[in-house]
Amino acid sequence: MTDPYREQHKQRLAYMPWLYPRLKPRHRAWAEPWQAALQAEWSRLETVHFGVHCFVAPQARLFAEPGRDIRIGDHTHLAADCVLHGPLTLGEHVSINHHATLEGGAAGIEIGDHTRIAAYATLYAFDHGLDAGALVREQPVRSRGIRIGRDVWLGARAGVVDGVTIGDHAVVGMGTVVTRDVPPWTIVAGNPARPIGRRPGAPPP
């Protein structure tokens, strides 16, 4: 018989996966087998590789054809309704919140350890040509890749375009569109993104 309280708790974890490591032993007793089964099924269906102590919401959407692997580091959490299309490499202790979209293109997306990607953020590692002599749908597609450093925070609804590198410890404000590289420790905001400061206590640039 289905336990409605357990099902509600699964929904809570799916949209707030940072609660997973804090589960009490009585909840961990059912949550860990639940997660093991989900992750095994993802790995059977797609070329997805999970580290240890990961969490993936059943409502997440992971697509990883052969040669477009998704590699997920230890203690990384993927929330409900996020869409991940490889090639992607996520470090350890990474958090991808609900409705975020990561499209690896051909060159891929790399995300460093301890980075947080907030809800509805979008990262697209490809771009269409814009030549006036052809329809957009007929243009060649290029992909240079996206590199996100360690301990980076991308705010809600932030966007990152192809070819961008965001340095370690940087912060990207809510609704920001990042069209060029961001130096380490820098806080950026706006559309297009502009530096507005540095993290308090950051070393000199």
Image (cartoon, rainbow, N blue to C red):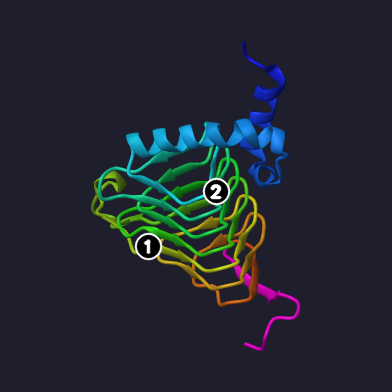
The furthest residue to the top? 1
Image position, residue 168 (x, y; %): 56, 73
Mark 2 is on which residue type?
A: His
The furthest residue to the bottom? 204
Give the label on residue 145, or none.
Answer: 1
Q: How busy is the neighbourhood of tag 2: few (under 14 within 10 Å), some, or many (20 plus)?
A: some
- Secondary structure mainly formed by the magenta segment: loop
Asked if the residue under mark 2 is in contact with the one under mark 1, i.e. CB atoms within 8 Å, the reply is no
Q: The N terminus appears in which quarter of the rendering?
A: top right
Q: Which residues are magenta?
A: 192-205
Image position, residue 48 (x, y; %): 37, 45
Give the label on residue 53, or none.
Answer: 2
Mark 1 is on which residue type?
A: Gly
Against 106, is 61 above or below? Answer: above
Left-right relation of 106 to 120 = left
Q: How busy is the neighbourhood of tag 1: few (under 14 within 10 Å), some, or many (20 plus)?
A: many
Image position, residue 163 (x, y; %): 40, 66
